[in-house]
Image (tube, grey):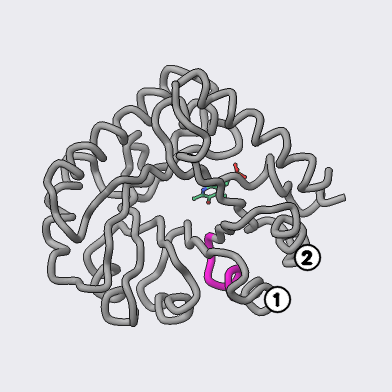
Amino acid sequence: MRVEDNLKQIKSAIQEACIKANRKTEEITLIAVTKYVTAERAQEALEAGIVHLGENRDEGLLAKWDVLKDKPTWHFIGTLQTRKVKNIIDKVDYIHSLDRHSLAKEINKRADRKINCFVQVNVSGEESKQGINPEEVADFISCLADYKNINIIGLMTMAPLSADEELLRSCFRKLKNLQSKVKDLGFDFAPCTELSMGMSNDFSLAIEEGATMVRIGTALVGQKSQED
Ligand SMILES: *Cc1c(COP(=O)(O)O)cnc(C)c1O
């Protein structure tokens, strides 16, 4: 499938979810996750009108950066090892996976401008999932005040791989509640207006529950074997 055709379908699904939830489509930023595909396929996404690209490993980001440079707005969405921050920091606009103090410290040290960061939250409590426990999020963010280059723009989560709609909704709802709480703290370094949640399988539900950024890979650009 061409990215253009997939994009049409996804846009209409986004629109439908927005109508259900009485939201505006302009509130939703679509991030094309290109981790499975080539730089050429990512280029095709840009030509189809995509602006935001997401990668989850530094190698993947750097390989695509070589080709696409700063044409897209880059999002780092995966687990980030502290020692790898320096490789990607001058290339990304958003980091979705801030989950520990040592990482915040390194981002702050290596960045020469404000980086928009999402605090990743392990809402589902699954052991396999990265992220801070929901009860610890407010305290974690409170401790970031001295990091001039870190702007906590929102919270991010990955829902469980499940077809149970209520389970998914409750996960997204919990993140939304947490986001409101952090926003209400009123920290100028943590406006926390955004919610990064929703992937190929669950983005419609995520939008209905308040997502402002959805991260879509498979359904939009496909996986390697599905490029043509
Ligand atoms: C891979 C990935 C996605 C996209 O997943 P799809 O199911 O292919 O849409 C979104 N977010 C993160 C953090 C990912 O690693």
Position of 172 relative to 127 (above/below): above
Quadrant housing residue 71: bottom right
Check residue 154 in the rendering and tell me which mark sits there, or answer none.
none
Report the predominant secondary structure element of the magenta stretch.
Answer: helix
Residues tagged 1 and 2 counted as in contact (Cβ below 8 A): yes
Q: Amino acid at mark 2?
A: Glu
In magenta segment, residue 59 = yes
Q: Amino acid at mark 1?
A: Val
Tell which of 206 and 27 is nearer to you: 27
Give the residue drawn at x 43%, y 41%. 212
Position of 27 relative to 94 (above/below): above
Secondary structure state at the residue bearing disc 2: helix
Question: Residue 104: percent from the left, percent from the top?
Answer: 26, 68
Give the residue at mark 2: 40
Secondary structure state at the residue bearing disc 1: helix
Label 2: how many residues lie within 10 Å, few (<14), some (14-19) or many (20+)?
few
Give the residue drawn at x 66%, y 30%. 12
Q: Which residues are magenta?
A: 56-62
Give the residue at mark 1: 67
Question: Residue 81: percent from the left, percent from the top?
Answer: 40, 69
Give the residue drawn at x 56%, y 46%. 30
